[in-house]
Amino acid sequence: MAFLEINSVRKSFAQSVAVENFDLQVERGEFISFLGPSGCGKTTTLRMIAGFEKPTSGEIRINGVDMTYTPPNRRNVGMVFQSYALFPNMTVADNIGFGLKVARKSAADIKARVAEMLRIVHLPEFGGRYPYQLSGGQQQRVALARALAIQPQVLLLDEPLSALDAKIRVSLRNEIRSIQRELGITTIYVTHDQEEALSLSDRIVVMSNGRVEQIGTPFEIYNFPTTRFVASFVGTLNVLTATVTDPARGRLSVAGQEITAAKPIEGVPANQSISVALRPEIISMNGTPASNGMNHINGTVDDVMFLGPTMRVRVRFGDQALQFDQFNNPHLNPPQQGQPIGVSFPPEACLILNDPAPR
Ligand code: ATP
């Protein structure tokens, strides 16, 4: 039995369906991210786990107990919001101790716990200050301390770093991960930032349009996306439309040129269109034609963007395009727009995606 179970959860509002058929089993101590673009249902799902929204159907269990309709204050769940949501008229210490006071803990217990929390978030001297006397990053650390003070079963973080500037974001991100590890607390983290999700999580739930696209470790999600959406949103891969020519041999045709995948293409008959993702870092220019087992495609340079250490080259062939990065070599002429070009990539670089190619 998983520590947090979300079973077939659906949430519809009057005008729209926000979350559909959501299933997730979270182990105790796991760090899970919900990753997806704005409006895909991440926050609604998090709010259902917190108890701020009721599922239209389905079930949420924490530590074996059905919590689907339990009010938020009886779930023992800590939440951190993008906007910090500190009480402005209370000191840092009172903010952190708020939940303990509501739970009628003794003054001595509250004092000790608040001191412990201030130490954990590296603000030991800040207990007497008010929120307006703190930077954004410090306020968010106080919000984190407040959420953790009640020793929640589950910690929920809703885009906690989005209001902060880039440098603070990276340092606080590392801090959140180390605090989460130190306390071993089961955590759900909502973000639309793929780098945050990849760097923080044990597993990522990629969402789009209220549905789960894929669940996996950062390694799996980045290297082996299963859908077109995950390939382009997380991995920034090239996604091509191909026609299967010989499924048993993994052979495909892309804009009239033959390529081969490393494995047979299962469950797809010949002549059907499929989506194929190609990792840009595996593609190279001017490779030798297929003799060495590499795939080879001929096209035309469509665009070259100079990025300093690398150049991003886009190559067009027929109605399709792919792009890749080349190291900048000052002693070689860069490719020119309109120039014919050959690109090579190994069969293993072709990832066959589950969803059909768009028509
Ligand atoms: P963001 O990153 O912008 O917060 P999100 O992925 O968290 O996006 P949600 O806030 O969960 O997305 O919203 C999912 C869908 O549900 C959206 O289409 C949104 O308009 C809709 N929605 C959310 N809350 C409500 C509500 N209270 N009433 C009606 N529709 C809602």
Image (tube, rainbow, N blue to C red):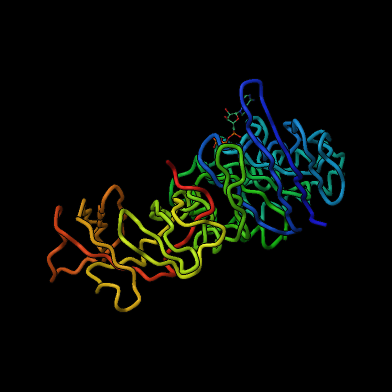
User: In the current view of this chain or complex, which residue is farthest to the top?
Assistant: 14
Quick check: 308 left or right of 239?
Answer: left
Residue for point 71% across, 50% down = 24
Residue for point 13% across, 71% down = 331
Camera-side residue of 333 and 159: 333
Camera-side residue of 75 and 217: 217
Spot occupied by residue 195 in the image (x, y as percentages of width and height): 48, 54
Residue 9, by quadrant, is top right
Quick check: 30 left or right of 348?
Answer: right
Quarter of image, ligand 1: top right
Spot occupied by residue 344 in the image (x, y as percentages of width and height): 30, 68
- Viewport quadrant of the N terminus: bottom right
Residue for point 50% across, 59% down = 222
User: In the current view of this chain or complex, which residue is farthest to the bottom?
Assistant: 292
Is residue 135 among the parts visible in the rendering? no
Spot occupied by residue 27 in the image (x, y as percentages of width and height): 75, 58
Is residue 271 among the parts visible in the rendering? yes
Q: Is residue 282 above or below residue 24?
A: below
- Viewport quadrant of the C terminus: top left
Quick check: 46 left or right of 193?
Answer: right
Q: Is residue 159 above or below residue 254?
A: above
Q: Is residue 84 above or below residue 222?
A: above
Camera-side residue of 290 and 33: 290
Residue 346, by quadrant, is bottom left
Spot occupied by residue 173 in the image (x, y as percentages of width and height): 54, 54
What is the tally of numbered marks visible in this picture? 0
Residue for point 78% across, 50% down = 153
